[in-house]
Structures are given as C-alpha cells and as structure tokens.
Amino acid sequence: MVEIYKNIYLVEIPLKGNPLKSLNCFIIKSNEQNLIVDTGFNTKESKDLLMGALKKLNIDLNKTLLFLTHLHSDHTGLASFLEENKVKVYISKIDGKLLNSSLDKDGVYWAGVVKGAVLQGLEKDNLNLEEHPGYKYRPSKKLKYISAEEGDSFNIGEYNFKVINLQGHTPGLMGLYEENHKILFCGDHILGEITPNITYWGEGYGDSLGKYMESLDKVYNMDVLHLFSSHRLLVKNHRERIAEIKKHHEKRLHEASNVLLKYGSSTVRTVTKNLHWDIRSKDWNDFPNSQKWFAAGEAQAHLERLRELGEVKSELINGIIYYRLI
Ligand SMILES: [Zn+2]
C-alpha cells in the first residue's frame, strides 16, 4: 500500500489468471468519513489484502462508503461482502441493475449474451456460457446499492468528489472528479498500457464506441493533474493518452471497413476473424473460446460505430446480422 496523494492510498490487488494483472483499489481517509474506490475479485486473497490495508489505516467500516466505477467483477467482487459489513455501496443505476441481473444464470442478462452470440454468427463456434469469464466470476449475492448519478458529490475530509458520467467501457461507468486538486478516478475509461475493451452491449444500448469517444473528449477538456486509473501504472499526461486511444480506434474502424470491402456483406464473426488481434493464436480455430466473446463484441462495437457514421448498413438474414458498406 502506498500513499499516492495526501490521505489517498493505493492498494494493488492481484487478479489471478487475468491479463490485467492487478486492480488499483483506492482508499481515501478522513476523520469523519472514508471512501473506497473499487474492490478486486471476490477471492479470499483479495479480501485478506483489502481488509489488511483497511485495518492498517484504522478505517471504521461504519463510516465508510464504497464507490464502484462500473459493474465488472474485478471492480465489484467484494462489494456484497463490504455491504454486509455496514459499508454503503454506490454504483450507477444502469450498471447496478446489469450487475444484479447477471447473478441469475437463467435470467435475462445471460439470455441476452447468448442471443447476441447467435446474431453475431458465433453459433458454429459452440461457445459455452461456462467459459465466459463474466459468467464464471459473476457475483454471488445481490447488492442493495445506492444509485450514483452525475453531479452527486462525496465530501471526504478536504476533498469534494463529484460523480461524472464516463459511459462507454460499460453503459454506466462513472468517475470521481476533485476540482480543487484536479484529481480524476476514471476506472477503466483510460488505462496506461492497455486499450480499454469497448464492446457492443445489445440493441438497447446503441453505439457504445461513439459514446466512449464522447467520454474521452469530455476528459480531454477537463483540467486533470492526477489521473488515477484502475489498472497498471498511473497515467502522467491524460491528453496524450486519450489521443493515442482515439488513434487506435480510428485505425480499427478503418480495418473493419477494409474487411467489408474485401468480403462484401459479412457477419460479425467473419469481420472478427479477419481483424488483427494481439493474441498468440494461429487462426480463429486456435483462438481461446473465452476470448471469442470479447473479440466479437469489440468488432461489433466498431461495425455499429461505422453504421452510426452512415458508412455501413446492417440487415438480418436467417437470424444473423450482416453488415455491408453503403
Ligand atoms: Zn472494466
């Protein structure tokens, strides 16, 4: 545990078997009230680590709030455990609802994931829900949570953190901004060495990449001196990093459009197979099944962006979506 700013502590919680390696959990301490930002997976190891850090800092859980930047299990794993220990939990309404609905293995959330895979043309890959990491590590207990909305604020000692909407990586990702100290806790919105995964969330959620790009512009225009991201190193220059991430997606959009140019009307599966991936696989058959869900989601987010930009059309043929250039 390191004090990265006055009364703000960083605890690195390992994420076993995950390429993200670890989660940056932040603890902000004051005499009246404390705040934890994100938790790590629901494992004994993370629980011991987090509880050890809280104990070392003499944190009274009765006077502590937990802010969850978004629904992913590496951020929310220990939320129900902390809630049972009198910690008040905050998450956006939309991510909170998605998170709670993902508990039920026969519920609408997973039915939507399976339906989405059929529309993407992934049926022939014989994907099994049990191999989906989000399914495998889904939380075990519903959260009561309090909905956090843009503009809400948390007063922790000398800090006044304002909730800001940074949707894109998930439909309800929220950050915390401290105007006087120019601190931004941004969750997975901007990461140092990794490009945050942007996926297609289904019909009701629209153009997630477009929304993500808007949220990048929002942070670009903000005065940020200390960007506290959820994984790996802390980003030094937020504008430089945002420019790099935007360039990556522009390149990716171009790549997706070139696949459509080459193959004509294509399923998400065909486009995904023909994009370049930073993964050690010979070809699509060799691609780990757990990663096929994510790759297809990312490819579709780019296709939906192209559709929103008026460059691509989609149509449903025999229960599968086909995209083609206009
Ligand atoms: Zn995430």
Image: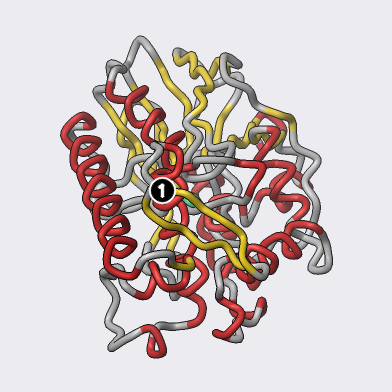
- How many marks on residues? 1
Kind of element beneath mark 1: strand
Q: Residue at x 66, y 42 (%)?
A: 204
Q: Horizontal placement of 78 versus 46: left or right?
A: right
The image quarter containing residue 58 is top right
**Relative to the observer, which residue lies in front, 205 or 182?**
205
Q: Horizontal placement of 147 versus 163: left or right?
A: right
Q: Residue at x 34, y 36 (%)?
A: 228
**Relative to the observer, which residue lies in front, 130 or 205?**
205
- x and y percent of residue 47 in the render? 59, 59
Disc 1 marks a residue whose amino acid type is Val
**Relative to the observer, which residue lies in front, 320 or 277?**
320
Q: Residue at x 34, y 62 (%)?
A: 260
Q: In the displayed orientation, state which residue is furthest to the top.
A: 180
**Relative to the observer, which residue lies in front, 71 or 53?**
71
Q: Horizontal placement of 310 versus 276: left or right?
A: right
Q: Mark 1 = which residue?
A: 312
The image shows residue 210, relative to residue 139, as above or below, that is above
